[in-house]
Amino acid sequence: PGGPAMMRTTGLIWFLILPPETTADGGALECPCLNSTSAQYAAISAASVSRGLSATYGLEGCKAYDANISLTGCDGASPPEHCGNFWCYIDLDLCPKRDDLCIANGGVPGSYTSPYCRTRDYVSSESSPGYLSYETCGSINVYNVSLLTADVEGHVL
């Protein structure tokens, strides 16, 4: 069972599932998730523990950290939509748009032609010293609905 044909098919499936600008679970290339070598890791971990959450809450790559967690209001039969969205804590120093590298790689700032041409949206955490991003994990931040409507305010649709 398996064999070379199966391996090629599996590889193709992974290619189709994961957009090329993201890593398997570490967030977007231009704005990766924090890892255990990050300067903010210990402080964010301690803040999570002090809230009664896991020491690795938001710190193990892209996951739906809030799913089934009563402290985040995501337990029960009908949890809010954001509970199933993937997110992680990020290092803002690694996330900014780099126009110089974008242009050097043949891109246009703000476009998707190169990971250097864009940045990922992020929000400061209300209960942690870190910043988190749904977008670096390919999710939409539906936790804060005001961010979804900001671009269309004042426009007729």
Image (cartoon, helix red, strand yellow):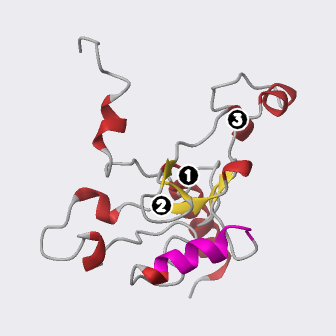
Tag 2, which secondary structure? loop
Say which amino acid is labelled 3. Answer: Lys
User: Taking the image as drawn, is residue 60 in sight?
Assistant: no
Question: Does dot 1 land on a helix, a strand or a loop?
Answer: helix
Q: Amino acid at mark 1?
A: Thr
Residue at 47% x, 69% y: name it. 63
Residue range highlighted in magenta: 38-48
Q: Quadrant of the C terminus?
A: top left
Labels 1 & 2 near each other (Cβ < 8 A): yes
Q: Is residue 120 above or below residue 38?
A: above
Sequence-earlier tag: 2 or 3: 2
Give SS at disc 3: loop
Lateral position of residue 130 relative to residue 39, left or right: left
Secondary structure that dominates the magenta span: helix
Please tell me the numbered disc located at residue 97. Answer: 3
Mark 1: few, some, or many residues within 10 Å (few <14, many ≥20)? many
Which residue reaches farthest right? 104
Apparent side of residue 89 relative to residue 74 in the rendered image (left or right)? right
Q: CA distance from mark 1 to mark 2?
A: 7 Å
Q: Looking at the image, which is closer to me, 48 or 138?
A: 48
Quarter-of-image position of residue 116: top right
Residue 51, picture quadrant: bottom left
Q: Which residue is mark 1?
A: 136
Identity of the amino acid at label 2? Trp
